[in-house]
Amino acid sequence: MHIRQDIAVWDNRRRMEESEDPNKNEQYHLEITADDIAETVLLPGNPGRVETITDMWDQSTVCGDHREFRTATGTYRETPISVTSTGIGGPSAAIAMEELARIGAESFIRVGSCGALSADVAVGDLIISSGAIRQEGTSAEYVRDGYPAVADYEVVSALTTAAERLGYDYHVGVTLSTDSFYPGQDRAGFNGYTPPESGSLIEDLKEMNVLNIEMEAATLLTIANLYQLRAGAICTVYANRETGVFQSGDDTKAAETASLGSHLLAKMDAVKRSAGADQWHAGLSIDSE
């Protein structure tokens, strides 16, 4: 009896896995295949940013458009590059990253928006995350609480180099990622609702020298480290929580910086291969092209 039950359970599980196989050629949520993407993928949240990004490129083609996930692939300065929108928050960002990794993506750059915590950071500036505080729930589904969400140093280097070459104001530091735009970021909820022990988040973060708040970086950085992939994040400052200034910013600077950063990553990889180096280091250099 137990043997027949075990066989039945196994058979049901097999049929379920076959019906929702996440490793099939066309990915379940993104509806794209390995032929549709490059090794480096930019990850904006808003599907509307996909066109903002691809307008910077030599050429591009939309490969998938399903739910919040819009994907396009093309070239930037002759370097193959892709972009996939992730929607808002860690869960959908994790789905995008999981499915992109399954079909060959190896490097990921979040291109988003954020709120800054220092009066020294102007609305419209760029913030490049060196790491993120995991105040979201998605990464906890993958690793234990103490696991760090750290940006890949090659991606950080490529993004800072790109921002320098483009002449854009930028800052590098620690990001806070949350699951809530309102109470989770110390904003009042509906009818002024504030959860218990709220009210000190912004000041606490400033004391800890945290630069900004957003909703996806910690998930993406955690998963990338876990799967031995490269990931980083660059965000346009839409709001300054200290000065109270809020303005939906111009996303073109972040789009151009991330696109150039992807091109520089490819050049860095080429230099590493030529030098026989496994890791990028200060002894290597890339030209200014």
Image: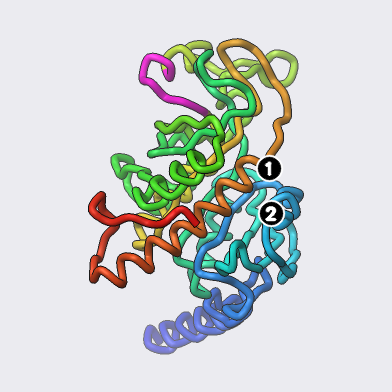
Residue 56 shows which numbered tag?
A: 2
Residue 252: mark in rendering: 1
**Could you tell me which quadrant the N terminus lies in?**
bottom left
Residue 23 included in the magenta stretch of the image: no
Nearer the observer, 133 or 261? 261
Q: Which secondary structure lies at badge 1?
A: helix
The structure residue drawn at horizontal position 63% and vertical position 60%, both measured from the top left corner, is 83
The part of the image, by quadrant, that contains residue 272 is bottom left
Residue situated in front as seen by the camera: 264 or 30: 264
Q: Position of residue 111 (x, y in %)?
A: 59, 46
Q: Which residues are magenta?
A: 205-212
Where in the figure is residue 282, as x and y percent of width and height?
A: 25, 49
Q: How is the image coloured?
A: rainbow
Apparent side of residue 169 relative to residue 31 in the rendered image (left or right): left
Front residue of this view, candidates 19 and 227? 227
Which one is in front, 154 or 163? 163
Is residue 215 at all visible to an observer of this figure?
A: no
Three-letter amino acid code of the residue under disc 1: Thr
Q: Amino acid at mark 2?
A: Met
* Position in image of residue 122 (x %, y %): 59, 21
Kind of element beneath mark 2: loop
Q: Position of residue 49 (x, y in %)?
A: 71, 48
* Residue at 56%, 12% in the rendered image: 242
Q: Quadrant of residue 244?
A: top right
